Image (tube, rainbow, N blue to C red):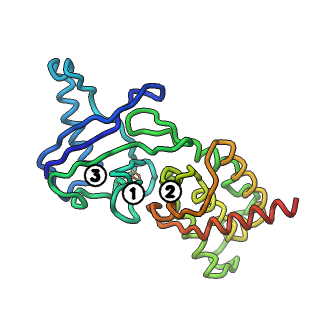
Amino acid sequence: MNLTLKIWRQANAKAKGRFEIYHVENISPDTSFLEMLDILNEQLVRQAKDPVAVSKGCRGPVTFDHDCREGICGMCSLYINGRAHGPDEDITTCQLHMRKFKNGDTITIEPWRSKGFPVVKDLVVDRSAYDKILQAGGFISVNTGGVPDGNAIPIAKRDVDESMDAAACIGCGACAATCKNGSAMLFVAARVSSLAKLPQGKIEAAARAKAMVAKMDELGFGSCTNTQACQAECPKGISIAHIARLNREFLCARLAD
Ligand code: FES
């Protein structure tokens, strides 16, 4: 496949960014999207050693985030052709393959566009706001003792399933990046829900919901208006039903106050 890539380049957080056009050739449909970017970067590294290319404005390799390349870490935050993580469903960018595109396609690649995730360089954004929300309450601090025997604490199957579904969130930021309000509600809801459905997490549920929502507001994330864009683009298929649970937890906590 021969492709044209329209990629956002930005030298640093304060610099003005712009799209630049690149061409890659003979890309196998079995290549992953990040491998395709690796191939482009090898090309750009070679060009960066060529004084003629440098004099024509070659800026060296494109900076992008990745770590596990297995859909686990949530680092590969890219907007591809206007969609978080690209055109496939329920996958991260690192799980996307070039067979989803056609020979001759032009692919637009941007970083997350969200007030909560400022651009650091090129396609890399600062997602530490999610870490700060987690630090505000996304944990259990009561002493739960040693590892209990399996089934020592009976938990209804439905509660376990809902908790595990919520725990699938990898904190990639697609929810906030894709939301027109820049809301991080799906992320916060998944964390609150995964703990609130288990007996160990119930003890601090009220304080957790209040602290995490307060931190989300403080960091500039917007409000949820139920557009459901977050659910549509979440690579882990997290349901907005968890947002309803977060709202309930939050409301009950405020009423109890
Ligand atoms: S690189 Fe880890 S989820 Fe994509």
| Dot placed on the residue nearer the N-terminal end, 3 or 2 | 3
- The amino acid on which the numbered mark 1 sits, given as a three-letter code, is Thr
Ligand 1 closer than 8 Å to label 1 CB: yes
Residue hosting label 1: 92
- The amino acid on which the numbered mark 3 sits, given as a three-letter code, is Phe
Residue placed most toward the observer, 38 or 26 = 26
Q: Which of the numbered marks, if any, corresponds to residue 245?
A: none
Specify few, some or many for label 3: CA neighbours under 10 Å numbering under 14, 14-19, or 20 or more: many
Q: Secondary structure at mark 2?
A: loop
The residue lying at 48 percent from left, 67 percent from top is: 237
Q: Which of the numbered marks, if any, corresponds to residue 170?
A: 2
CB within 8 Å, label 3 to label 1 = no
The residue lying at 24 percent from left, 43 percent from top is: 5
Residue placed most toward the observer, 240 or 236 = 240
The residue lying at 78 percent from left, 63 percent from top is: 251
Ligand 1 closer than 8 Å to label 2 CB: yes
Q: Secondary structure at mark 1?
A: loop
Q: Quadrant of residue 187?
A: bottom right
35 is higher (above) or lower (below) than 155: above
Specify few, some or many for label 1: CA neighbours under 10 Å numbering under 14, 14-19, or 20 or more: many
Residue placed most toward the observer, 212 or 183 = 183
Q: Position of residue 232 (x, y in %)?
A: 46, 64
In the image as oriented, which residue stretches furthest toward the left?
26
Residue hosting label 3: 33
The residue lying at 72 percent from left, 58 percent from top is: 209
- The amino acid on which the numbered mark 2 sits, given as a three-letter code, is Ile
| Dot placed on the residue nearer the N-terminal end, 3 or 1 | 3
Indicate which label's residue lies in the foreground, 3 or 2: 3
CB within 8 Å, label 2 to label 1 = yes
